[in-house]
Image (tube, rainbow, N blue to C red):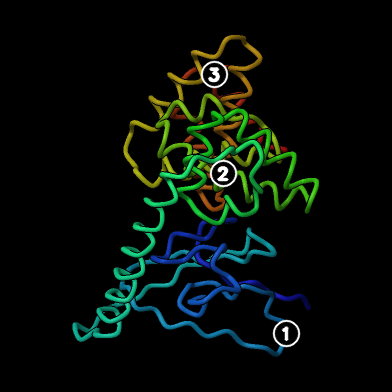
């Protein structure tokens, strides 16, 4: 029997349940995120109280293909969420002030410690703005793999991809690379999917179709397949349908390719 690390969708950043983020593990307030923050061994238990009504995806960080859905219903008398929401608002306000002040201080992002930047979404966005997305991906991939492992780098580039979409919109997808198992592509698709709608397919077709070479174009659509599979929580039928909706057969081929490996 093996341990299971219970967490909110989406692997590997786990931010879908409000307030959750794997980067908060081991820090103050970690008990309020939907994340066990470690493997739960056979015989152990993990408890979490949901204060937000809705339908929430759950997966195993150690085996992401193990997934489930938790439905939370409101009884109309839910004061804890109001109290915690107030605490969160105060904390967010303080964080915004801190972020504003730090943004006024010039910083050489070529020299900063990547690990510290990755703890703060606003810092990630500023690094992308200062260095450009391709250099940011290269720097994160090099430093995180050197210090940790390729799997850690993949999660780190999910974060970069998430924030790159906030900075660059759909153009971020066209600037990602396949570094660390296409983590940047995954992160961009993950954030694009959160906005929903048909525009995601039009945006991918437009951005990938504009790549300079056929090879780059094909790798871009291949990256879309990676992202669709992750966003679909490894449900092949959903990922295949997403690839199909991209259009022409040669486009579908490269998108499908990751699904049959």
Closer-to-camera residue (102/236): 102
Q: Are marks 1 and 3 in contact (CB under 8 Å)?
A: no
- Image coordinates of residue 64 in percent, x first then y, are 63, 59
Number of numbered discs on residues = 3
Q: Is residue 133 above or below residue 152?
A: above
- Which one is closest to the eye, mark 1 or mark 3? 1
Measure the alpha-carbon separation of dots 1 and 3. 47 Å
Pointer 2 with pointer 3, Cβ within 8 A: no
Who comes first in sequence, dot 2 or dot 3? Answer: 2
Q: Which secondary structure lies at badge 2? A: helix
Return the disc, 2 or 1, that comes first in the chain's sequence. Answer: 1
How crowded is the residue under tag 3: few (<14 C-alpha within 10 Å), some, or many (20+)? few
Residue 171: percent from left, percent from top: 45, 25
Quarter of image, res 85: bottom left
Q: State which quarter of the image contains the N terminus.
A: bottom right
State the image coordinates of residue 200 (x, y, percent, origin top left): 39, 33
Q: Which residue is mark 1?
A: 42
Name the residue carrying label 3: 249
6 to 189, vertically: above or below: below
Which residue is at the front of the view, 208 or 250? 208
Measured from the top left, where is residue 152 in percent x and y? 70, 53
Mark 1 residue element? loop
Q: Which residue is mark 2?
A: 229
Work out which residue is located at the far front of the displayed protein and give it. Answer: 105
Question: Which one is closest to the eye, mark 2 or mark 3?
Answer: 2
Q: Mark 1 and mark 2 in contact (Cβ < 8 Å)?
A: no
């Amino acid at each position: 029997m093996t341990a299971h690390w219970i967490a909110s969708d989406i692997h590997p950043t786990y931010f879908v349940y409000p307030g959750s983020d794997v980067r908060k593990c081991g820090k103050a307030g970690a008990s309020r995120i939907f994340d066990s923050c470690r493997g739960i061994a056979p015989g152990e238990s993990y408890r979490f109280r949901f204060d937000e009504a809705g339908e929430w995806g759950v997966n195993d960080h150690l085996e992401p293909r193990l997934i489930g859905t938790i439905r939370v219903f409101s009884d109309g008398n839910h004061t804890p969420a109001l109290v915690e929401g107030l605490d969160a608002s105060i904390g967010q306000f303080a964080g915004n002030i801190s972020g504003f002040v730090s943004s006024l201080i010039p910083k050489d992002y070529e020299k900063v410690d990547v690990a510290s930047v990755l703890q703060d979404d606003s810092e990630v966005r500023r690094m992308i703005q200062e260095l450009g997305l391709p250099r940011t991906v290269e720097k994160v991939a090099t430093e995180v793999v050197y210090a940790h492992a390729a799997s850690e780098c993949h999660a780190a580039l999910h974060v970069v991809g998430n924030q790159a979409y906030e900075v660059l919109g759909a153009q971020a997808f066209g600037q990602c690379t396949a570094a660390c198992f296409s983590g940047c592509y995954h992160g961009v698709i993950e954030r694009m999917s959160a906005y929903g709608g048909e525009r995601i397919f039009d945006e991918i077709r437009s951005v990938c179709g504009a790549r300079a070479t056929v090879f780059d174009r094909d790798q871009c659509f291949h990256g879309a397949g990676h992202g669709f599979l992750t966003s679909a929580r490894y449900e092949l039928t959903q990922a295949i349908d997403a690839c199909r909706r991209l259009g022409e057969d040669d486009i579908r081929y490269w998108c499908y390719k990751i699904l049959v490996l």
